[in-house]
Amino acid sequence: MLDECMTNSDVVLDVQDLVVHYELKNEVVKAVNGISFTLQKGRSIGLVGETGAGKTTTALAIMNLVPKPPGVVKSGTIDVCGYKMLELKPKQLEKIRGKEISMIFQDPMTSLNPVISVGEQIAESVKLHENVSASEAYDRAIEMLELVGIPGERAGEYPHQFSGGMRQRVLIAIALACNPRILIADEPTTALDVTIQAQVLNMINDLKKQFGTALIMITHDLGVVAKMCDDVAVMYAGRIVEKGTLEDVFNDTKHPYTEGLFNSLPDITKRESELKPIPGLIADPTKLPEGCAFAPRCQYATDACRERPPTIHQISPTHLVECTAYDNPGFQIEGWQNHG
Amino acid sequence: MLRYAVIRLLWLIPILICVSLIIFVLMDAAPGSIIDSMINEEMTQEDIEELKREYDLDKSVFYRYGKYMLGLFRGNLGSSEISGLSVFDMYKTRFPKTLELSLLSLVLGTLIAIPMGIFAAKHAGTIWDNLTTAFTLIGLSMPSFWLGLLLLIWFSHSIKLFPAGYDGTWKCYVMPVIAGGFSMSASITRQTRSAILDVVRQDYLRTARAKGVPEWRVTVKHELRNAWIPIVTQIGMMLAMTMAGSAVIEAVYSWPGVGRLMIEAINQRDTTLACGCVILTATLYVVLLLLVDIVYAFIDPRIRAQYSAGRRKKRRAEA
């Protein structure tokens, strides 16, 4: 029964009002504060934001892998192919993880077990989810390695014998070994050289098309989003501040924070132009303000922004922005510098 | 790896020279000598002098040591000065009893220690962890002879469940194995707990969980395999120590092992026997620790790679 997705609709992932806190001894880190989004079969969404915006916590919550303690999922529902991830027993979770949904982690240097051969690490997941013998699972592992561009005969080697880019490919092979419906890629290229980055991204793209996998791409790199994603959700201090299709967010930017992100990108065609970083630091998740968390850094902020939580505005059927400034129908951001 | 093993074994030579010298000097410095038990009132001063000459006691300790070492380099451990039996044969007949005791203690100790260490690490900071810490502290600070005596009083003297000494039945193993296993399990538990704590926050465990690996398998396959090295080191050291003869426990339970043989030899001032036992024990110790080092290479492919890197370098140098 678990082999088949229980839902017939195209929505493979539905996250509603997710709130995740880390309750430490003397403070509470409010990492994720009410996030909702859905993902359709074969589509891809980019979660964009600075370090500490709650992207990885969101991903871990979707897998129900938030480290507890100190992590606590305060509220919300997560629906993966019809399974309520937050309500399942460990045994059921183990059947879904790696099979319906899997994840590529940020740091390839530490995410592979150093004392187990890479082939065995890929085969482990196949053995767990499919009714195959150990040798069949290993054969599949070799196939997967070749699929990600590593010669199959290296399956018996250990992680320390591979370079960073190759280890990331091994992690991708592990994640895709059972052909999951959803793949979460948590900054899969951050730890890699630029040249390797492009290779790895292309590979994820190809495999995604080949298997029809839905993708959640977590990144702080807008270039990666442009290359990989159909939809974009911009996160700030544990909330999605702007959400829409790639065109919505890139060509019709609404949120001042999104604007700030684009302004912080260097433009190689205009070398003399100065970077315009967002002033200030990302909001301290242990002391979030009453009003909009971005207000202290926002050039458009008014008293209304600082006093009450931001209001949500539907710009178009696909485009959503969470910003009090749009209460004023005439409000417009300056538009980002490198626009057009 | 072979090269490494040979070098380690060559180190045995200076070690053995040192320990045997220490034994000789200490035995000489200790009051009394081998002939004390042979002297009776009817002996004249001349008879005693004669006896002394027979055992070279009229010469310096270094003369006796030199004579002994000469024999040793010919591969001869000599024979007991009291019984006249070959030291090696005496050791050989006693050793299986010590081996039985130490292996059984080790199995008991490890079977308790590893699950308990994992349990404590998984519940670090909770009452369960504290209880485990209390257990290990008791185990480490309680002298094993004291536990041995307590067990004797309870189970042998009061309720007469187990025999007080060695009688060849399975019953006589129970108390010494518990007494030996208890202190062993304490130190292995501590080592397991800290080794597991070192790996529990590693990223690769998250990768394993994300694959859908069940939690028990994450522990056994992914955590334990990375935590093995310090645990195996501790186990190896414990094994080496008890194999060397847990003299105290063997004495408490009058166990016919090498530990008691050594104590008897020292009490009777049988220098040749004592020195022979110490030399064999030291050799055993070094070999066991070497085996532990070799086991590392089987546990961790990175260590294996270091050994083969050495080989590659050598091959390149030869080419």
Image (cartoon, coloured by chain):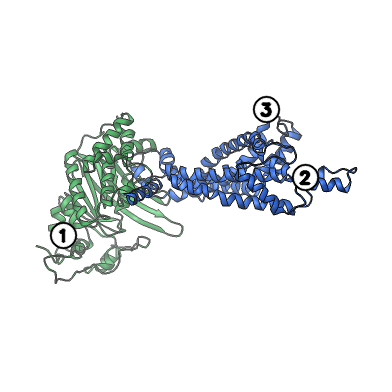
Camera-near label (1 vs 2) is 2
Residue B78 relative to residue A124: left or right: right
Give whichever of discs 2 and 3 has the lower sequence position.
2
Which residue bears the numbered disc 2? Answer: B54
Quadrant the N terminus of chain A occupies: top left
Kindly check if marks 2 and 3 are in contact, taking CB atoms under 8 A apart as contact: no
Q: Amino acid at mark 2?
A: Glu
Q: Where residue B210 sits: x, y (%)?
A: 33, 43
**Count of numbered tags:** 3
At mark 3, the secondary structure is: loop
Q: Nearer the viewer, residue B1 or A84?
A: B1
- Disc assigned to residue B262: none
Q: Where residue B298 sits: x, y (%)?
A: 42, 41
The answer to whether dots 2 and 3 both sit on one chain is yes
Query: Where on the picture, by quarter, is residue A324?
Result: bottom left
Question: What's the chain of the residue with tag 3?
Answer: B
Which residue bears the numbered disc 1? Answer: A253
Question: What's the chain of the residue with tag 2?
Answer: B
Kindly check if marks 1 and 3 are in contact, taking CB atoms under 8 A apart as contact: no
Residue A157 relative to residue A324: left or right: right
Q: Nearer the viewer, residue A258 or B292?
A: B292
Colour displayed for chain B in the image of the structure: blue
Q: CA distance from mark 1 to mark 2?
A: 106 Å
Q: Where residue B175 sits: x, y (%)?
A: 67, 36
Colour displayed for chain A in the image of the structure: green
Q: Nearer the viewer, residue A234 or A158?
A: A158
